[in-house]
Image (cartoon, rainbow, N blue to C red):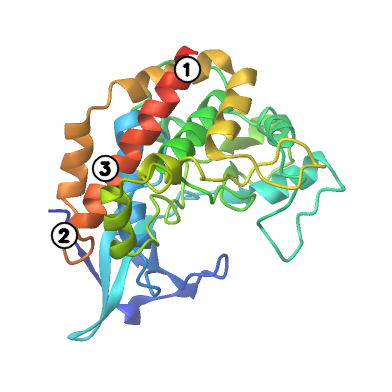
Amino acid sequence: MYKIHRVDPSLFEAVETLGAKRKSWFRQDNKRVLFKAETRGTGEDWAEKIACELCRLLGLPHVHYELAHEYDGKTARGPGVICDSCASGNRWLMLGNQLLLTIDSDYPAHGEKNYKVSQHTVGAVVDAIDFVTMPTDEWMQDMPFEANSALDIFVGYVMLDAWIANPDRHHQNWAVLWDGQQLSGERLQLAPTFDHGASLARNLSDEERKKRLTSKDMNYQVPKFAARARSAFYGQVSDERTLGTHEAFWQFAEIASEAAKCWLKQLQLIKPASIQAILDKVPEQRMSMIAKEFTLQLLSVNQQRLLEENLT
């Protein structure tokens, strides 16, 4: 089983205001660590941990998450996850909306919403990513192939989204690391992928999961459900809807085809037993057996679909 780290709120030093979830920073082993509370009871904690472990299987640069539980003395307050800050030393996190604003002065970086920003197009993001360099070596140690650009890595992030049904890569859920000096491509490095707590259909009830797993209605089964997943990217500014997660990946893949092929080859190597092993390590009090069964099938359906689409 995955270790559940005990978190003491008396050690919290600062509140993280970005996002809707309750998040706090504290120091542990001379590192700056973020605690993300799971206050909704919708499985964001286990989704974050599983997505992290799937990134490891793929070899994607990613922030590492561990399961945690917050305690006020001996009183358990609630579950969550912890992760080290990826913006250590003299580097700061510049979020996607801020980077896009440096490329396009008209980009709506400071609006009230992160979702349904139609200017967050595949083309705009590619132009922005072309401006930065690859993640630093500390994040690239498990890379399965030689990447040539930050875009090569980002294509892997978008393939991950299609695999885990992640709708949440909006313009504040991807970033670059900046040393605070004059803005230039050499000063900006793509950050590892982070914040996947909205993935894996974690907010479904177990009742719905069971119905979808056992239904004889093909329009209600997991494959149809999986096909509905939307990304946070638009194809064109004029589009009324975001692209599906698979559509988004294939649009990025058309631009960086060799990288896409490499990531798909890596995805093809991942066997159901490896995924099952990850799911089995999540304590049952955090993730039910029916949730594990549904998640395994969801991942299998999306993996098969990505690989079959690649063959057409």
SS at mark 2 in the image: loop
Number of numbered callouts drawn: 3
Q: Are marks 1 and 3 in contact (CB under 8 Å)?
A: no
Q: Which mark is residue 283?
A: 2
Res. 126 in view: yes
Q: Which residue is disc 3 drawn over? A: 296
Amino acid type of the residue tagged 3 in the rendering? Leu
Q: Which mark is residue 106?
A: none
CA gap between label 1 and label 3 equals 21 Å
Residue 204 in the image, given as x and y percentages of width and height: 38, 61
Residue 126 in the image, given as x and y percentages of width and height: 68, 30
SS at mark 1 in the image: helix
Along the line of sight, which residue is nearer the eye, 267 or 298? 298
Residue at 71% from the left image edge and 50% from the top image edge: 98
Using the image, determine if residue 110 lies above or below residue 274: below
Q: Which residue is disc 1 drawn over? A: 310
Structural crowding at the residue carrying mark 3, measured as other residues with C-alpha within 10 Å and reported as few (<14), some (14–19) or many (≥20): some
Residue 102 in the image, given as x and y percentages of width and height: 78, 43
Residue at 21% from the left image edge and 86% from the top image edge: 73
Dot placed on the residue nearer the N-terminal end, 2 or 1: 2
Amino acid type of the residue tagged 2 in the rendering? Pro
Res. 144 in view: no
Using the image, determine if residue 212 lies above or below residue 25: above
Residue 232 in the image, given as x and y percentages of width and height: 61, 47
CA gap between label 2 and label 1 equals 35 Å
Which of the 4 quarters of the picture holds residue 163?
top left
